[in-house]
Amino acid sequence: MAIKEPERIWWKPYTWDEKFWVAVALLWMLTTFTFMPVYHFIGKQNPPFETYRVRNPEQFTALVDAMVEKYKVGEEEGIPVVHPEPGSDVFLQASMWQWYPILQLEKGKTYRIHVYSLDIVHGMSILPINMNFMVLPDYDYVLTLTPTTSGEYHIVCNEYCGLGHHMMVGKLYVK
Ligand SMILES: [Cu+2]
């Protein structure tokens, strides 16, 4: 014999508040479900559609070096500061444990930023604005970026990448 039998089957009688909350939950579920694809088009935070496979890391590094040589305007703690031509292809390389080089961009100009990781997974997080992007090795991610506010930004790695992870902080200037 059970200690205590349930008094009734819970959905009988099916009261108005039961119906109401099931309806609310269902409607909200449908709303968020529909909003996922809708936000893909109306949101302004889409991941890039343009990604290339990098089969030869030296080739990418050669592009980085060529850009640094052409547009170098200074140096900070051994890392070159580069001011590439507005509208041009810009290269940013992640590796344990640095972002290379330091970029100097112009406000209101659009750049194609090629982000690439030489070794393992890194996370590109631009602070203090909330922009996050995961960088897997072997791919060239093209981020089309138009800075809208000037200032000094930090590029922080937000994927744990080994002992020096916490020191992996790059810089980005917008003038
Ligand atoms: Cu990292």
Image (tube, rainbow, N blue to C red):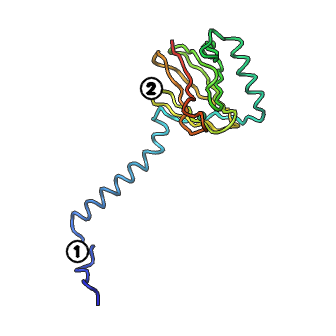
Q: Quadrant of residue 39?
A: top left
Q: Earlier in the sequence, mark 1 or mark 2?
A: 1
Q: In which quadrant of the rendered image does the N terminus lie?
A: bottom left
Q: Measured from the top left, where is residue 54 in percent x and y?
A: 73, 34
In this rendering, the answer to whether 87 lies above or below 115 is above
> Disc 1 marks which residue?
13
Q: Amino acid at mark 2?
A: Pro
Residue furthest to the top: 73
34 with respect to 27 (left or right): right
Dot 2, crowdedness within 10 Å: few (<14), some or many (≥20)? few
Q: Which mark is residue 128?
A: 2
Q: Amino acid at mark 1?
A: Pro
Q: Nearer the viewer, mark 1 or mark 2?
A: 2
Q: Are marks 1 and 2 in contact (CB under 8 Å)?
A: no
In this rendering, the answer to whether 29 lies above or below 97 is below
Near-viewer residue (169 or 58)? 169
Q: Measured from the top left, where is residue 5 in percent x and y?
A: 25, 83
Residue at image coords 56%, 15% = 105
Residue at image coords 24%, 79% = 8
Disc 1, SS: loop
Disc 2, SS: loop
35 with respect to 69 (left or right): left
Near-viewer residue (139 or 111)? 139
Q: Ligand 1 closer than 8 Å to the CB at disc 1?
A: no
162 with respect to 70 (left or right): left
Residue at image coords 63%, 39% = 121
Dot 1, crowdedness within 10 Å: few (<14), some or many (≥20)? few
In this rendering, the answer to whether 159 lies above or below 74 is below
Q: Which mark is residue 40?
A: none
Q: Quadrant of residue 159?
A: top right
